[in-house]
């Protein structure tokens, strides 16, 4: 009689890229009770077969550990289907026809709110890509829906990383918003466009990346309810699972409405993504309260690896230096946060932020910053209370000098990158923008690697697949110029895979449980459409998952299914 632990499932005959310390390649794995119990050659793994064991024949397919997105904004993906899409509309008459069709199902006076004009996920080339080369006016929207207020939302600016943001309204919507020829913009970054007679023409432009108009002038138009967020979250996870992602880290923090959605989905047993959330604070009303008292009160939930379980965990706190006037306008919509999902009032004046960070260090709470000015502040805090062992996070890395890399190493910081923006979309602009002598400092992954700094890859939801950042880390390719940006900073495919697996596990303080296919670790994996180690480099970004497992359970499947 065999003494080997019986497996619930065996996957065999594949190229299993374990991402273990030796980056070894296995042929088969056995899973029991949600964890790997054997990894290696087929004959060895087969010893764990029992009468009840299910099988999946990999037929040579490549397998990776479940990918870990270091800055996901996962909840946004499902929200994209809450409001009707205008994708495919390439002229004003086509937009009018889509609006008119929506009006058929609306009672007079009921709002019609849509997604932006253009093609997701990036919404490039507008309004030039419309046949008329311009935006529709309020009168043209009136013609489509004369009895309903119409509001066409702007994009979330980080989808495209270019300005302006544009939203559109018809006459009824303008009246409900109280917008007349005398109305002042809610902020200097907003322009209320006018026609030749000086009347609002229904076009609102914003010089910023985070929508402001919908949170101020059009705050009465329908937004995302908590119920819609709850319904959208499983849709979001399905999209991420389709590309092999099994864990996300929300380092930008979550506001109460997003945290509530996660908790409700988890309580209903429908959360299939391992989700590690950081806390996004709203400091209004606490200006005179000592930070030690505030942070000490939160420590029981936020300290260390935080509060929760393998599927949902809350820990750490994000902050920014400074409170901007535009965010003050957005924060008036609180507790509603729109696309952001984080509080707009998370920023603090520098000395108050330092006080908060010192309190975090004393209470063992991880702190997160996503802008470069946080690095020096972290260093100042370290002189008061050592932070090296707390795994504080610096995210959204764009440009770093060698001196900053050394400081990051000395502080023991963990990094998340944003290659979708700072290599692929904007990399070709950063040398001139930052006055750099060359491009080496742009997303300097090679420097980080040489310094022994742990950096993870992240999507920022633009798009959802981590194979884009993997490809960007290796190819350094610019979307606009089709040339390499900072060629000397390119890393190997192995390094890119480790950044999407091992590093993500370290970032979420869960390296003992995930990030590699090893005995004892959680059985999170993805069976891929192509081998990421050998596929032609331009095709690396197009790799997807045929089957994704979380804890040995199938959460996404294409052509592969378990058999008895």
Image: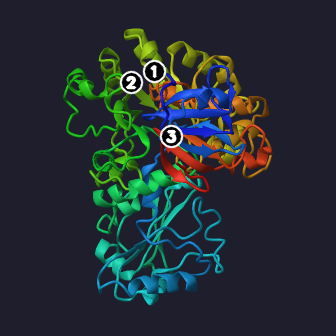
Q: Neighbour class for label 1 at 10 Å: few (<14), some, many (≥20)?
A: many
Label 3 with label 1: CB-CB less than 8 Å: no
Q: Position of residue 359 (x, y in %)?
A: 30, 19
Residue in the picture at 79% in, 49% down: 482
Q: Residue 419 versus residue 189: which sits nearer the camera?
A: 419
Q: Is residue 454 visible?
A: yes
Label 2 with label 1: CB-CB less than 8 Å: yes
Nearer mark to the viewer, of 3 and 2: 3
Residue pointed to by mark 1: 391
Tell me the element at label 2.
loop
Q: How many marks?
A: 3
Residue in the picture at 75% in, 44% down: 477
Q: Which labelled disc corresponds to residue 67?
A: none
Residue pointed to by mark 2: 366
Which mark is first along the chain, 1 or 2?
2
Which mark is first along the chain, 1 or 3?
3
Tell me the element at label 3.
loop
Q: Position of residue 156 (x, y in %)?
A: 49, 56
Left or right: 485 with respect to 259? right
Query: Which of the 4 image quarters holds residue 23?
Result: top right
Q: Position of residue 328 (x, y in %)?
A: 33, 47
Query: Colour scheme used in the picture?
Result: rainbow
Q: Which labelled disc corresponds to residue 53?
A: 3
Q: Residue 15 versus residue 131: which sits nearer the camera?
A: 15
Q: Residue 284 versus residue 481: which sits nearer the camera?
A: 481
Looking at the image, residue 378 lies above or below residue 146: above
Which mark is first along the chain, 2 or 3?
3
């Amino acid at each position: 009689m065999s003494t080997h632990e019986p497996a619930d499932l065996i996957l065999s005959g594949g190229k299993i890229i374990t991402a273990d310390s030796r980056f070894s390649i296995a042929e088969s794995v056995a899973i029991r009770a949600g964890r790997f119990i054997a990894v290696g050659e087929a004959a060895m793994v087969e010893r764990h077969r029992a009468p009840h064991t299910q099988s999946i024949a990999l037929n040579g397919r490549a397998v990776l550990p479940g990918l870990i997105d270091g800055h996901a904004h996962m909840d946004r993906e499902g929200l994209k289907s809450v409001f009707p899409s205008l994708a495919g509309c390439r002229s004003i008459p086509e937009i009018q026809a889509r609006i008119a069709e929506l009006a058929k199902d609306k009672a007079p006076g009921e709002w019609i709110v849509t997604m932006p004009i253009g093609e997701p996920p990036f919404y490039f080339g507008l309004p030039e890509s419309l046949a008329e080369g311009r935006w529709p006016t309020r009168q043209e929207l009136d013609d489509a829906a004369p009895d309903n207020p119409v509001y066409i939302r702007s994009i979330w600016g980080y989808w495209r990383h270019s300005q302006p943001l544009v939203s559109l309204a018809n006459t009824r919507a303008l009246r409900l918003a109280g917008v007349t020829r005398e109305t002042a913009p809610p902020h200097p970054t907003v322009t209320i466009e006018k026609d030749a007679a000086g009347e609002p023409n229904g076009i609102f432009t914003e010089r910023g990346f985070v929508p402001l108009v919908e949170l101020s002038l059009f705050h009465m138009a329908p937004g995302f309810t908590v119920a819609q967020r709850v319904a959208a979250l499983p849709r979001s996870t399905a999209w991420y699972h389709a590309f092999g992602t099994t864990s996300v880290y929300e380092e930008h923090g979550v506001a109460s409405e997003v945290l509530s959605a996660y908790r409700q989905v988890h309580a209903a047993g429908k959360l299939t993504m391992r989700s590690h959330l950081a806390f996004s604070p709203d400091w209004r009303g606490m200006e005179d309260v000592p930070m030690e008292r505030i942070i000490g009160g939160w420590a029981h939930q936020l300290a260390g690896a935080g509060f929760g379980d393998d599927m949902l965990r809350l820990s750490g706190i994000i902050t920014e230096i400074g409170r901007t006037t535009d965010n003050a306008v957005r924060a008036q919509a609180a507790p509603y946060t729109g696309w952001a999902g984080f509080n707009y009032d998370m920023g603090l004046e520098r000395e108050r932020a330092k006080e908060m960070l010192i309190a975090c260090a004393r209470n063992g709470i991880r702190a997160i910053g996503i802008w470069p000015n946080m690095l020096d502040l972290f260093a100042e805090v370290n002189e008061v209370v050592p932070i090296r062992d707390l795994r504080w996070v610096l995210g959204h890395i764009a440009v770093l000098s060698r001196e900053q890399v050394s400081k990051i190493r000395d502080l023991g910081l963990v990094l998340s990158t944003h290659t979708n923006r700072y290599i692929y979309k904007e990399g070709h602009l950063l040398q001139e923008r930052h006055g750099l002598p060359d491009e080496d400092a742009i997303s300097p992954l090679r420097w980080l690697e040489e310094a022994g700094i742990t950096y993870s890859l992240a999507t920022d939801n633009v798009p959802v697949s981590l194979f884009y950042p993997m490809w960007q880390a290796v190819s350094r390719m610019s979307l606009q110029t089709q040339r390499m940006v900072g060629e000397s900073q390119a890393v190997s495919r192995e390094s890119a895979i480790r950044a999407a697996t091992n590093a993500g596990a370290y970032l979420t303080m869960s390296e003992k449980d995930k990030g590699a296919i090893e005995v004892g670790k959680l059985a999170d994996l993805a069976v891929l459409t192509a081998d990421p180690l050998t596929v032609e480099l331009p095709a690396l970004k197009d790799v997807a998952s045929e089957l994704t497992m979380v804890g040995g359970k199938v959460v996404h499947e294409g052509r592969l299914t378990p058999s008895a």
